[in-house]
Amino acid sequence: MHSSIGKSLIIAGIIIAAIGLAVLYRDSIPFLKYLGKLPGDIRVQRERFSFSFPITTSIILSILLSLIIYCIQRFRG
């Protein structure tokens, strides 16, 4: 039981580190610099106010993460 918790924590740490690196080098990775600026993302900018709701980006990321999780579970057993 303890080994499965340890493996899960290591995998979670690797995933968090990968996300951190992607955010850090966002402008140098071609497809990441468009996240939040896709057609369908809501952006309102006024003189003293700005609001951003990246709905299209959220949907695309949700689909990608769902596919990744599905593939991991499918090949796992």
Image: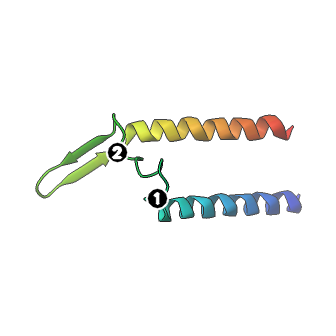
Q: Nearer the viewer, residue 30 or 49?
A: 30
Gap between marks 1 and 2 measured at Cα: 13 Å
Q: Nearer the viewer, residue 24 or 44?
A: 24
| Quadrant in the picture for the C terminus | top right
Kind of residue indicated by mark 1: Arg
Question: Tag 1, which secondary structure?
Answer: loop
Q: Which residue is mark 2?
A: 37
Q: How many marks?
A: 2
Q: Which residue is mark 1?
A: 26
| Quadrant in the picture for the N terminus | bottom right
Characterize the local packing of mark 1: few (<14), some (14-19) or many (20 or more) Cα atoms within 10 angstroms.
some
Characterize the local packing of mark 2: few (<14), some (14-19) or many (20 or more) Cα atoms within 10 angstroms.
some
Residue at screen point 25% across, 49% down: 51
Could you say where residue 47 lies in the image, as x and y percent from the top left? 10, 55
Q: Residue furthest left?
A: 47
When asked about the image quadrant of residue 62, the answer is top right
Question: Tag 2, which secondary structure?
Answer: loop
Could you say where residue 61 lies in the image, as x and y percent from the top left? 52, 41
Structure colour scheme: rainbow
Kind of residue indicated by mark 2: Lys
Q: Earlier in the sequence, mark 1 or mark 2?
A: 1
Q: In this image, 77 relative to 51: left or right?
A: right
